[in-house]
Amino acid sequence: MAAALKVLLVEDDDSFREIIALHLQSEGWEILTARDGEAAMDIFARDQPDVLLLDVMLPKMTGIEVCAAIRRDHQPGPGIVMLTARDSEADTVLGFDVGADDYVIKPCRPREIIARIRAVARRMDRTESTMLATARAPTLLERGSVLIDLDKRLATVSGSALKLTQTEFALLALLAENHEKVYSRKDLLQRIWDTDHDGYARNVDCHVTRLRRKLENAGLAPAPIHTVHGTGYCFSFTRPG
């Protein structure tokens, strides 16, 4: 049996934080809480949670600043799910740019938050079924100059490590393992985000864009992740026709 998931909930609205914490605890998870960004950084350093549920608008340090600091200093680091207001699409995009794995738009139901945390946790091999599947699969994938170590959750280009979030690593591993296969956005939402909700399609596009940028910065230009117009995305060192 895997250890209980440890979740750090960072939210400055006391009532909302208490309600969400109770729902998360009902899942059998260990819940830590903070009401501002500086406290979140202190708790993260001390307790090393698996997943952060992080409001964008926080006192002292914003959620964006907390996410950026953690991604800068910790690799591969925790899963990070951002809480963002319905009218703040710019915050959502910025959250992805600094390394968030997923987001939930407020107001939201606790079950939606739990589903997003579960999806991130699944990418981190937290469930027994995922760990068993990983044990049966090849531990190393080599595609040209790209080497992916599934056990260590490490990807390199020509020997240099890529700094990837949990979601970016899962996306790269899936596309590279099945190179030349075209995945639709719906396929990727189901396989990576564990949802078929079309409203999360922007997740796919944002993460593909970030992954391409990181591969290109590592010397792979153009990046071997291609858009197949009207269909989806694939990993290939030759551009699909």
Image (cartoon, helix red, strand yellow):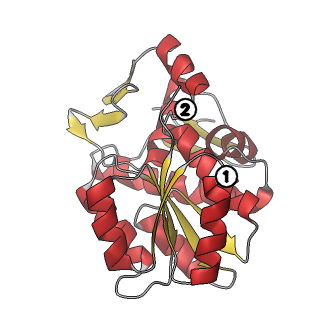
**Residue at the spot of label 1:** 26
Amino acid type at circle 2 is Leu
Amino acid type at circle 1 is Ser
Quadrant (top left, top right, bottom left, bottom right) of the C terminus: top right
Mark 1, mark 2: which one is toward the viewer?
1
Residue 153 in the image: x percent, y percent?
37, 34
Q: What element carries label 1?
A: loop
Residue 110 in the image: x percent, y percent?
72, 63
- Residue drawn at (61%, 42%) of the image: 192
**Residue at the spot of label 2:** 174
- Residue drawn at (51%, 40%) of the image: 4
Farthest residue to the bottom: give it. Answer: 59
Residue 177 in the image: x percent, y percent?
51, 24
Label disc, if present, on residue 136 of the rendered structure: none
Residue nearest the observer in this picture, 3 or 101 = 3
Q: Is residue 229 visible?
A: yes
Residue 152 in the image: x percent, y percent?
33, 29
Please tell me which of labels 1 and 2 falls first in the chain.
1
**Lateral position of residue 194 relative to residue 80, left or right:** right
